[in-house]
Image (spheres, rainbow, N blue to C red):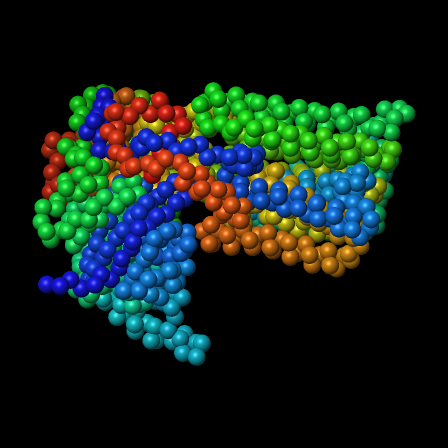
Amino acid sequence: MTTPTGATPTGATTTGATPEKRGGLADLRKMFGNGQSTLRQFGILGSLVVIIGLFQLLTWLIKGTGLTLSSTNLINVVNQYSYILILAIGMVMVIIMGHIDLSVGSVAAFTGIIVAKAMSEWNLPWPLAIVLGLLVGAAVGAWQGFWVAYVGVPAFIVTLAGMLIFRGGNQWIGQSTTTPVPVEFTYIGAGYLPDVAGSAFNYATMALGVLGAAWIVFTELRLRSVQKKMGSPQAPLWVSIVKIVLLAGVILWAAWLFATGRPGTSFPISGIILVLLVILYSFITRSTVFGRHIYAVGGNRLAATLSGVKDRRVDFFVMMNMSVLASLAGMIFVARSTASGPQDGNGWELDAIAAVFIGGAAVSGGIGTVIGSIVGGLVMAFLNNGLQLLGVGADWVQIIKGMVLLLAVGVDVWSKSQGRPSILGLWTRRRRARLEEQGPTEPPAVVPSSGTNESSEPRDVARL
Amino acid sequence: MSAPPPILEMRSITKEFPGVKALSDVSLTVMPAEIHAICGENGAGKSTLMKVLSGVYPHGTYTGEIFFRGEEVQFRDIRQSEHAGIAIIHQELALIPELSITENIFLGNEIARGGRIDWPAAKRKALDLLARVGLSEDPDTQIKHLGVGKQQLVEIAKALAKDVKLLILDEPTAALNEDDSQHLLDLILGLKGRGIASIMISHKLNEIEQIADAITIIRDGHAIETLDVHGGDVDEDRIIRGMVGRSLESRYPDRTPHIGEVFFEVRDWTIQHPQVPERLVAKGSNLEVRRGEIVGLAGLMGAGRTELAMSIFGRSYGTYLAGTIVKDGKEIVLKDVESAIDHGLAYVSEDRKVLGLNLLDTIKRSIVSAKLRKISRLDVVDEFKESQVAESYRKQLRIKSPSVDMGVAKLSGGNQQKVVLAKWMFTDPDLLILDEPTRGIDVGAKYEIYTIIQQLAAQGKGVILISSELPELLGIADRIYTVFEGRITDNLPVSEATPEALMRSMTSAKKKANA
Ligand SMILES: Nc1ncnc2c1ncn2[C@@H]1O[C@H](COP(=O)(O)OP(=O)(O)OP(=O)(O)O)[C@@H](O)[C@H]1O
Ligand SMILES: [Mg+2]
């Protein structure tokens, strides 16, 4: 067996390991996974914080008290937007694949009416009705997935057709009137975690918050131990501590706000469903074979098929999954409004798509994350909510939302075409450049490969 | 003789990417009507330097000064540099396949009168330009009907249409066959005769030696030296010494082959063209590979080597008509890529950007992407193992990058190729099909890739190597098949193969293979 000898004409492994420059920001960014859109998503998280802070301030200035971060309002936001965020989860997967789904609002309404009819007219018990609703979603999704994946009709067309078909279906089944649903069913859309008898403070919500905080601590510790085991670059301890304190703090604080709301209210059930879905789908997209296949096909379909990925199957399941989530969103909405109506879900597809793009997905596919889309959706939600709190009319709310969408994606496109990262990226780079100046200057080194024991420098940063 | 002032002077160019200093303090001087070659290993910074020059990386994102025709220039985008008379031809062609030659040539530079495009004038001028680059094609032909070589010429015609003063060619001949390459080189020489200077990046040192007037060598982002070719004493070995810092005794690593039994056989393989049913791209081809053997496939561009390989690899090309595959004595049916991978086949495609990599992905995710299940349990990817695997390949193949978390899009061409190679090594194949694996790769990295191929053979794997460079095939293959118009025309042990003999079988079907 021939091994590389001293004659191997390469020498590019340079020794001088540059000083570790992965600061806290880079590390925090990793919460959004590794990828090119990371920076962008980190930026959008910043925008969310700014928007929330801004409206808190504005309501405080105008109305005398900060309304945005009040318990009642937060509960409201979750109740009003959880179904859009659920749609965004499915939509980001669709968009990563390079498709689009315009039918989600109609599919939601279609499922809503079937479920409502099933309960009110055929007296189907509500748990079975939910199962039925999900099955309807799966069937609709299989239908659309079939056309996209196996016939090859662009998803835009298939779901545009679906938008018409299922809207019509809703109105035909419901005779364009509203159909009420039984009280027990409304729990999934308008229910809250139960109070312990006689206490205004909702212990269940707080317990969840504590659980969430503990999970943050646990994952951070695990990350550190894995990094240590691998000998890969580790952020300084203070970064981890700041990260834990910040994240866990936000979670606990939010939990406290939710727990101390008006008696009888607390963290909404729809919010819990959302959180569970976010965790589940983040995991699926990041860590499962199927999730990897979504990114692979979306990024380069040819290369993916030549790597053994069955692209059509991925197309099919992603489209199908979207419709299942749309059904779920439709049911939650019906539960919240206690009836299914002919206009349910109008325009939802646009909100969901906007959330995904604000959250950093690329129109050309291959890029996007569940968490990013949720943050993007929250940006829209708090913007909407804040403007409403200030008494801005629906006309202006739409205009402003449109501008924000354009701006968010525009800044992104612009910064890319300039060959520079976003403003935040510029800042981190300048900081890095400063660090570099302080670091040792590295002479061009050409080391015979046989003499380089690479394993002895696990942090080796090859200078290129 | 007093030297004329240089047409281009780049002074102390430094360009940094996050975590990577791609260029440090590089200076480059190009004289009028000079052909200036830039050589260096993969990732040395050649393409980056040209992108700085042409405004891809705008002024302000690098430090240093650029003087073009005596004036300092600060390009903010490609349009500005084009306007000044600098045209860059990237290796990835930037033509629009659906448009005609004329439309492409004048895209963004239309000949218009009062807002209306003057097509007759445009066509006349296009014909004139095509004549200048020596391309006899109807200017109405759509680009997609042209081969790569001709497309390359259209690119140059497009540059000439803009009254170019300095032409930059980044690895222009990497995807061309010998004839087309030679034509292109002659054309560059012709342009020089008309006073147009060129900067040419290439890993084909023989071409550089043939046409360059001066050679600047870049190593690890530093300009090492500039060689004056007419001063004498510049040959390939001299260039290599500059590039890698020491001389290279041999281009091909030594090896004693240990060839075993035939374990892979393709019989009567017949494949139809995907669009043109009457065309057969493989006509009853027979092929066999022994354990530990490196089998070469020689042929001209379009002979059907890639098509043959891809159709074997899970029928990923064309329509299967007839033929069987036998592996380890058993007939196997490879209906799709997944089954091909499961049966131990791997295919490293010739076009890494289009077929080999998801450019949005990181190094580590790319490396494991063809066999995710190997590091998964219950379909959940073990990210810890993923990093470990990727890290070990990064070291083994010397992929130049600060970490495996880097996006593959940011790697230089040669390092991307290593990632593709790692990806297929990770599937642990029995039969590795390599399609032009050293295209766009520097001499040093080529040697490394040959070494890896030989190591794989030494482990008892079979290797099929498709290459357009005969010296490469003669250098490392044990046996060579020649392919001509979808037929296997010859089967020669390397000891009997000569370039002349191969060339004969590559251009005519007079001898039938007896595999
Ligand atoms: N956008 C980028 N971000 C980060 N690093 C980059 C980027 N573009 C290039 N690099 C790095 O800069 C170095 C120089 O790359 P460049 O493409 O100029 O190499 P090259 O000399 O053209 O190599 P090749 O012969 O392989 O094409 C490489 O190490 C590459 O990884
Ligand atoms: Mg290059």
Q: Which residue is drawn at 34% across and 75% down?
A: B120
Side (left or right) of B202 relative to B403: left
Residue A390, placed above or below residue A255: below
Question: In this view of the protein, which residue sits in the foreground, A300 or B82?
Answer: B82
Residue at image coords 43%, 76%: B116
Q: Identify whether A361 is placed above or below B424.
A: below
Q: Where is residue A7 in the image (x, y as percent from the top left)?
A: 19, 29
Q: In this view, does A431 lie to the left or right of B39?
A: right
Instruction: Name the spot of residue A162 as percent of width and height, x first.
Output: 65, 49
Confirm whether residue A355 shows in the render: yes
Seen at 25% across and 53% down, the residue is: B28
Q: How many marks?
A: 0
Q: Quadrant of residue A131?
A: top right
The quarter holding residue B242 reads: top left
The quarter of the rendered structure image containing the N terminus of chain A is top left
Q: Which residue lies furthest to the front in this view?
A: A438
Could you say where residue B226 lies in the image, as x and y percent from the top left?
19, 49
- Which residue is outermost to the bottom? B114
Ligand 1 quadrant in view: top left
Q: Residue at x 32, y 30 (%)?
A: A15
Quadrant placement of the C terminus of chain A: top left
Residue B43, percent across and down?
A: 32, 41
Residue B335: quadrant of the picture: top left
Q: Can residue B286 be seen in this view?
A: no
